Amino acid sequence: MSNVILSMRGITKQYQMGEETQTVLRGIDLDVKQGEFVAVLGPSGSGKSTLMNIIGCLDTPTSGSYILHGRDVSSLDEDDLANVRNKEIGFIFQSFQLLQRQDALQNVELPLIYSGMHTHDRTARAKQMLERVGLSDKLHHFPNQLSGGQQQRVAIARALANNPTILLADEPTGALDQKTGKQVMSLFHDLNEEGNTIIMITHDIGIARHAKRIVRILDGNLTEGVAEDA
Ligand SMILES: Nc1ncnc2c1ncn2[C@@H]1O[C@H](COP(=O)(O)OP(=O)(O)O)[C@@H](O)[C@H]1O
Ligand SMILES: [Mg+2]
């Protein structure tokens, strides 16, 4: 049994727009091992979000194979995709995506409700995750009572709650100032040291360099590494 937890071969994605077919991903091969911290770096329009949607089981490829945690997820239906997603992926977004009418604790409990954990265990787990990201004194603060960096840490606690196979972050520092962004990268570094597998999508080489491995996407093609002068 290898420790590859994500394996893509020949992944393509095409969008049909009337008569025209746009090819956005052109045969992506990617292996990610348990415990890696990988940045997917590329400019706007290169296909990052399209790839992220496939990695995160929000969408399926037009062709190619995708094995996630030993399961072929390349052609699942909506319900199965949703189940895999909830179990395997912890999402972190640029805009945090917290529920504004729920406090920090309730936001972190949400994925645990979906996975069927009982109230008592759920609250304990959510508290533990908020403590992990340094917010144990903010359990009952609502998103608008928290700074951007604190909101992103709530989102990270939420992503960790179900102990996912992969933490999948899309421009996680895009809405943060530079100093706060660095703090979030420092948290990612620590979470990775603790064994979490992280895939982070970014257009920012400075952010990508916090990862241990960089893959570059350009016009729907993926290449390993980045030139030293980039
Ligand atoms: N749902 C869609 N339908 C049609 N074209 C799309 C769709 N999503 C993305 N695209 C096109 O795919 C290309 C890559 O988009 P995207 O994956 O969002 O790139 P990035 O996140 O790197 O900016 C763009 O040319 C975009 O217009
Ligand atoms: Mg994008």
Image (cartoon, rainbow, N blue to C red):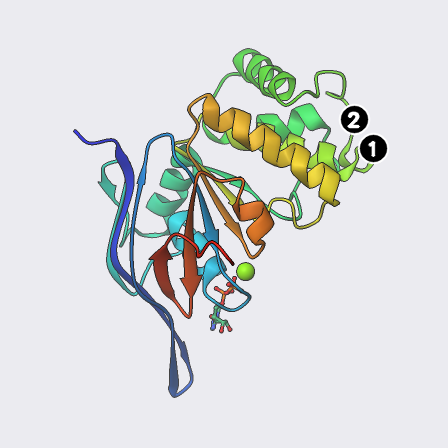
Q: Callout 2, which amino acid?
A: His
Q: Quadrant of the N terminus?
A: top left
Q: Position of residue 67 (x, y in %)?
A: 25, 45
Could one spot residue 160 in this view of the protein? Answer: yes
The quarter of the picture where residue 136 lies is top right
Q: Cβ(mark 1) to ligand 2 < 8 Å?
A: no
Whether 45 is drawn above or below 213: the answer is: below
Ligand 2 is found in which quarter of the picture?
bottom right
Query: Image point 42% across, 70% down: which residue?
Result: 219
Task: Report, in whole angstroms, how far the alpha carbon at label 1 lies from the one at label 2.
Answer: 6 Å
Marks 1 and 2: CB-CB under 8 Å?
Answer: yes
The quarter of the picture where residue 11 lies is bottom left
Residue sitting nearer the eye, 26 or 63: 26
Question: Please, which residue is most extreme toward the front here?
Answer: 229
Residue sitting nearer the eye, 179 or 60: 179
Whether 213 is drawn above or below 134: the answer is: below
The quarter of the picture where residue 190 lies is top right
Whether 24 is drawn above or below 87: the answer is: below
Query: Image point 41% across, 33% down: which residue?
Result: 197
Q: Callout 1, which amino acid?
A: Gln
Q: Position of residue 20 (x, y in %)?
A: 39, 85
Q: Badge 1 is on which residue?
A: 145
Residue sitting nearer the eye, 216 or 92: 216
**Label 1: how many Cα within 10 Å (few below 14, some 14–19, many 20+):** some
Could one spot residue 110 in this view of the protein? Answer: no
Q: Position of residue 131 (x, y in %)?
A: 64, 16
Question: Please, which residue is most extreme toward the bottom here?
Answer: 19
Q: Badge 2 is on which residue?
A: 141
Query: Image point 44% across, 61% down: which residue?
Result: 50
The disc placed on residue 109 is none
Query: Image point 55% across, 16% down: which residue?
Result: 125
